[in-house]
Amino acid sequence: MSQLGYVATPPYSQAQSGMGRYQGNLGLIPPVQSMYSHYGGPPQAFSVPPQSGVIMEPPVSTATGMPPPPVSIHYNSNIQQNGALPQRYPAPPAGSATYGQPSQYNSMASQASPPIQQLTNQIHDMNLGSSYVLQAMQSPPPVSSVAQPPLQTAPVPATTQPPMSPGPPRSPHTSPQMTQTQLAQTSMGMASPPMAIGMGRPFQGPPGPPSPGPGGFQQLGPGYPQQPGQVGGQMTGPQPGFPGAFSGAAVQKPGPRKKLDPDSTPSPTQVIEDDQAKRGGQVYATNLRGQVPPLVTTQFTVQDQGNASPRFMRCTIYSFPSSSDLAKQCKVPLASIIKPFATLPKNESPLCLVDHGETGPIRCNRCKAYMCPFMQFIDGGRHYQCGFCNYVNEVPESYIQFLDHMGRRVDRQERPELCLGSYEFTTTLEFCKNNKRPNPPAYIFMIDVSSSNIKSGLVRLLCNELKALLNNLPREDGTMSSAVNVGFVTYNKILHFYNVKSILTQPQMLVVSDTADMFVPLLDGFLVNYQDSKDVICNLLDQIPDMFEDNNETDTVFAPVIQAGLEALKAAECSGKLLLFHSSMPTAEAPGKLKNRDDKNLVNTKTEKILFQPLKGVYEQLSKECVAQGCCVDLFLFPNQYTDLATMADVPSHTGGSVYKYSNFQVETDGKHFLRDLRKDVMKNIGFDAVMRVRTSTGFRASDFFGAIHMTNSTEVEMAAVDCDKALTVEFKHDDNLCEEPGALIQCAMLYTSVSGQRRLRIHNLSLNCVSSISELYKSCETDSLMNYFAKSAYRAILTQPIKNVSETLVSQTAEILAFYRKKNNPSPTGQLVLPEALKVFPVYMNSLMKTAPLVCSTELATDDRALQMLAVMAMGVEETQLLLYPRLIPLHNMDVGSEAVHAPLRCSEERLADTGMFLLENGRSMFLWLGQACPPELIQSIFNLPSLAHLTTYMSALPELDNPQSRKLCFIISSLLQKSPRSMNLQLVRQKDDSERLFRQCLVEDMGVYGGHSYMDFLCLLHTEIRQLLP
Ligand SMILES: [Zn+2]
């Protein structure tokens, strides 16, 4: 590039004080072509067809209209009893999240219950009248075996429940209202091995009577050593394709072995399919209070009729326990997951904007709740009673309207705030900072041009992309262009600001080398409208890669870069987003300098939490300042080694930002993946400088908040930005008893600055039921939302507690929730594991959570990756946590290429794989294409254009798009999944038995964890034993 016109600026890589100016002859502007026409197209729904070769259960009836169960009779006495039980596992003090206290969970070794391996289980779905029989089988099991009768029933006669055939009289032990799943104990031996587990303690069979069954359960002494990382003890036995690879103790036992049929455990994929079959394709109207919405995996259309769409708000439970005692005993966390900016499908109405004029939005004088369908108009329409605090307010003169014979306003259907669950208000100046209308937000692109980013090709790729991408900055609905301004900074040890004012013919560079006291060297011309300055900006983006091509600087600064962006937004008096494209841990002498503190010796110790705690000081202060300014920080990280991500991601994770990590980035393999992320990030709908308040009706209140947020007091949630993918989870606690009649009302009000610079209020209202019936309570639970809550609360607990305690707390919480139900609702003896219908797959998700990277204490996993997942989950909505905890496993070798339908996902277990198969697995963060060893050459040929598996390089970044039906179908499936996902995923090819298989196998969440952790079946047994300890 030309150095002509270069004024008073030393070489870029050299530190200098003060500022210089750069005026290069930057050449002609290349024509910019829009590459984004397809972004505007309608999103293609990725639909799982209900009929796809998997046998479907009949829809579960809701049991409405049934008489109430006879549980309330026992209720009061048991409340007393519950607190006074001589339990080995004393119930934690009040409240469902008990991380604050030391865990009281004890080792299984000391329990006086039969060996869990002796459990043979029967599962009855009471409501269906159909039965699953969890049975013993010879090893190795056929994947689709014909059910056999259980070999032997339980020794305790009362526990025995005969397998139910469709339509027989119901068992006298079960109340007909209940829909639940039971695992009944029998005495059949099950030769599952003793095994090491990833919960920081040995998994030991409890002492008890020796196994009478065949197969011989071997009792372990308390000293059985933990075997971290052992891949063994699969109850499924060796797979033909994996001789010895997964050999556990039991597998090595000679002779025939009894084992449980994995098909008999409650199946997450079946639950998903059933819900899709029952509620998919339908219109879900939100007119009913306490209505449980379809699952997040189900495709449905929402019609707002007075409650917020489940896309905006989901709850762990839709019928709150009416008394605080009941809430404390049932242990079901009361929480709502709120995604205020959730993207709505095209066929659902966008939010209405309500203008109440000069007076501003009408709100209760006492509790400040905003006008909503929960306000009761009285006195001929001249007053209204607040649904939240019951205060009687006067209706403003201009808002008075007649009431009809039902006491409802006659204009209620014309006013969104009276008939809808979600809407927006325009605001008055008093809602604006300093009583001043905000300026439109700005996006500042801050590019690390140290040698690593130059050599990997990142800088060139990014600059090239931005020229087109900046045409697609977010804009207000109905406007032609974006009001968002843009600015550019490059840096390594020093910072270069660019003047890209439209009247310039060439961009100007201004250098700041004093990183200790960051300031912005120019105000006019730094933040500009892209369309106005397009020529100068494209000129700059063309030149940046060449300017730094020979840069050998490897050291970088980081905190000063954020500080610089923040100062620029302050100077421009606007909110906005900093997009940092950063290569390495900041080691240059400057504020926020970091050093390697990745100590693997800490893993699996009490002080492991230190690894995940961000360093205090500079970054903590920066977070506060960023939030105060409405400055969101997105970090795109391209590291080649450890970067102390826990600290580097601290500011993004408190400012509503996102962190993306591309280890050992190379343009050829990771370029497309990065660009997909970048495009989604830049274009997504977002609000800035947000303050959120969650108001509730009397008797309960919001008590805790989880998310990419900042709290300065206990009630106001501050978010520098909130985009369409960010969700926060709000936990509620009882203050008092709740009345059943008015229900439990929640109003989430978020004040924010829109992408066009308008100050708006977004309101989401939701009404829930309040019940004292335990069966109603458990029926209204939502497993996916519960898991979102548990994931966030557990990950936050990692920062303050030993990980072992966190996992143990999760086990005891699961047991407590199920034990209380069991105690209150099923009079049959304790030999059965009873799972309420709505929670029947809760254990498999809970077990999966405990096997996620942050919670497994394995030195094999990179600390940065664990920290990244921890932070990412904190901002996830329910869809994302569901998929993360139960990945989608799609068989591809038997694709129906004649249709667009995709095979229904299979259960995540090795059992479902086949040597001759090809499977796609994705969890929203990773995507794998698994290829069986005996995958037919024709299939390999049609997908990869290669003669055999041996020719395949696993570093392929994308599949070739070939002109044959198999290739087209697979590419379609992958692109549909990527389009739907908030994040891009790089397709990883995994050949059966390759080393890389471990990461894939970690996603088979029903199996024993690769880095430790129970199999699903073992976890059920563990849980059963835990629950027995809690029962009288
Ligand atoms: Zn009120």
Image (cartoon, rainbow, N blue to C red):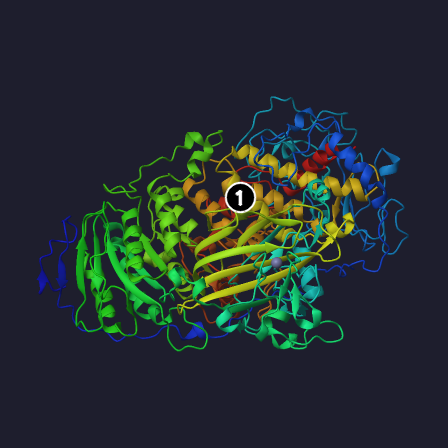
**Residue at horizontal 66%, vertical 24%?**
220
Where residue 634 sits, quadrant-wise, is bottom left
Please indicate whether residue 32 sits to the left or right of residue 837 in the image. left
**Residue at horizontal 61%, vertical 32%?**
195
Q: Nearer the viewer, residue 743 or 1011?
A: 743
How many residues crowd mark 1 within 10 Å: few (<14), some (14–19), many (20+)?
many
Q: Looking at the image, is 408 positioned above or below residue 993?
A: below
Where residue 794 sits, quadrant-wise, is top right
How many numbered marks have been drawn onto this rendered protein structure?
1
Q: Is residue 868 visible?
A: yes
**Residue at horizontal 69%, vertical 41%?**
328
Q: Which residue is mark 1?
A: 852
Q: Amino acid at mark 1?
A: Thr
Q: Is residue 355 visible?
A: no
Displayed-image quarter of ligand 1: bottom right
Please indicate whether residue 1021 sits to the left or right of residue 895 in the image. right
Where residue 351 sits, quadrant-wise, is bottom right
Q: Nearer the viewer, residue 157 or 365?
A: 365
